[in-house]
Image (tube, rainbow, N blue to C red):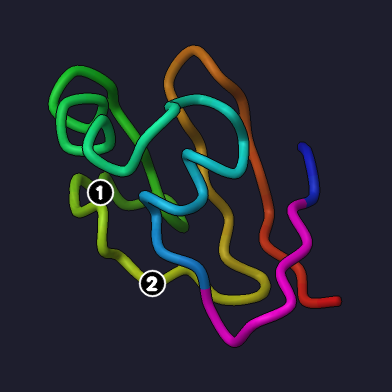
Amino acid sequence: MELVKIDSEFITLGQLLKLLNIIDTGGQAKFFLQENDIWVNGEKENRRGRKLYASDRIRIQHNGEYQIISK
């Protein structure tokens, strides 16, 4: 599991995908979420605006598992 440090209260799922270099632009998030499965804390998620907070765990199909931590 890879730790992802954020310096704000939360990060959106779309922003996380960009931060991890999985997508290049925010507009690609919608299409990525339609074609790939993502789970947040064990529940399937498809909203790019989903807010992710410290301690949230994210599993992205074909890309791995991540945990949000605050700086």
Residue type, label 1: Glu
Residue type, label 2: Lys
Query: How many residues crowd mark 2 within 10 Å: few (<14), some (14–19), many (20+)?
Result: some
Query: How many residues crowd mark 1 within 10 Å: few (<14), some (14–19), many (20+)?
Result: some
User: In the picture, residue 1 is in which quadrant?
Assistant: top right
Q: Is residue 50 left or right of residue 18?
A: left
Q: Is residue 46 above or below residue 64?
A: below
For the residues marked 1 and 2, what is the alpha-carbon distance in whole angstroms?
A: 11 Å
**Quarter occupied by the C terminus:** bottom right
User: In the picture, residue 46 is in which quadrant?
Assistant: top left
Secondary element at image label 1:
strand
Instruction: Farthest residue to the top: give it.
Output: 62
Instruction: Farthest residue to the bottom: give it.
Output: 9
Q: Nearer the viewer, residue 8 or 2?
A: 8
Residue segment shown in magenta: 4-10
Residue lying at 71% horizontally and 69% vertically, measured from the top left: 6
Q: Is residue 49 left or right of residue 52?
A: left
Q: Nearer the viewer, residue 37 or 9?
A: 9
Q: Mark 1 vs mark 2: give the one in front.
A: 2
Residue lying at 59% horizontally and 87% vertically, measured from the top left: 9
> Which label number is shown at residue 3?
none
> Which label number is shown at residue 51?
2
Q: Is residue 38 above or below residue 56?
A: above
Q: Is residue 58 above or below residue 37?
A: below
Residue lying at 25% horizontally and 52% vertically, measured from the top left: 48
The first of marks 1 and 2 along the sequence is 1
Circle 1 residue: 45
Q: Position of residue 11 (x, y in %)?
A: 50, 68
Q: Position of residue 70 (x, y in %)?
A: 77, 76
Marks 1 and 2 in Cβ contact (< 8 Å): no
Residue lying at 78% horizontally and 62% vertically, measured from the top left: 5
